[in-house]
Amino acid sequence: MMDRKLLPVIGLLLLCSLTDQTNPHKMKQKALTAQGQDCTAIKASTPNAQSGIYIIQPRGDHKPFKVYCEMLTGGGWTVFQRRIGGEVSFDRKWAGYKQGFGYLKKDHWLGLAKVWALTRSSGQTSVLRVDLWDFEGGAASAEYSHFRIGEEQTAYKLSVGTYKGTAGDAIRGRYSGSDQNGFGFSTVDRDNDGCSPCIFGDIATNDCASSEGGGWWFSGCGSASLHGAWHPAGDNIGWGSGVHWDTWKGPAPYSLRATRMMVKSM
């Protein structure tokens, strides 16, 4: 029989294990005290700051929230997406993608509402960085200037500027009609893509989120989709619903080993 003296300790450990979640709405928490408006500001004010979980409060946003900061030589980056395996399902509906899910140190999506808060200020510009890893030891990245997403009324419409990097510009796509820039975010229960329908050989689809998997800024349906089902090594080629950045890997559909999306304010 369990010692009653241990019960408070076990409860405390349980509480601590949950604090890494992006959406711990079922927990009662103390009010969070912001350490900066974003990871870029924290790194600028504390140059020796190390990568990890911080509390930020973007300009104009009244509620601080936790994020994972990558503190690199060139500045602090706020991570809003990470995939390193199949532990967390990205097959979510609109509410999940709006609020966020997963664990900040592992697989997670920070939430569309929070990404909007990070990029909404008219007084700053932001850079988007996408890091990609394959199963053969390779890595590539893509950076976009002037990154922002619109408010919810626009379906969090994606806007990116100039591309640079080694992964290729998959957001604008490998072929005509696949440019995702300027499209709203889509999920299985909120269709904002450019298909009405899209024709792939003898297959027609009206809903990219159902065929590609997960939520994304689909166009028709596009060359980038990092929220499909994660597939392990040896079973990661040929899946239409995988984790794709088609300007880097191909020509057969190649589902990536790991991805990370981050934003840095300028």
Image (tube, rainbow, N blue to C red):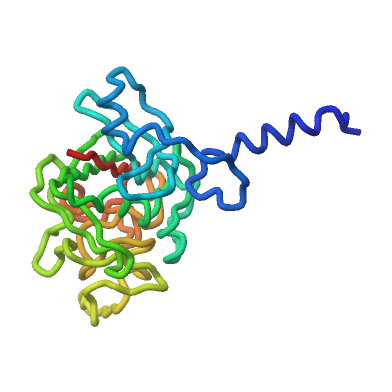
- Residue 34: name its quadrant: top left
Residue 187 against residue 245 in the figure, above or below: below
Q: Quadrant of the N terminus?
A: top right
Seen as rendered, the residue at the extreme right is: 1
The quadrant of the rendering that contains the C terminus is top left
- Rendering coords of residue 5 (x, y %): 85, 27
Q: Image quarter for residue 73?
A: top left
Total label count? 0
In the shown orientation, is residue 6 left or right of residue 228? right
The percent position of residue 214, horizontal first and vertical second, equals 38, 61
Asked whether, in this view, residue 213 is left or right of residue 44, the answer is: right
Outermost residue on the top side: it is 48
Residue at 20 percent of width and 63 percent of height = 222
Nearest the camera: 252 or 174? Answer: 174
Q: Is residue 86 left or right of residue 176?
A: right
- Asked if residue 241 is positioned above or below residue 226 in the image, the reply reads below
Q: Residue at x 47, y 51 (%)?
A: 101
- Can you say whether 19 is above or below 231 in the image? above
Q: Nearer the viewer, residue 179 or 212?
A: 179
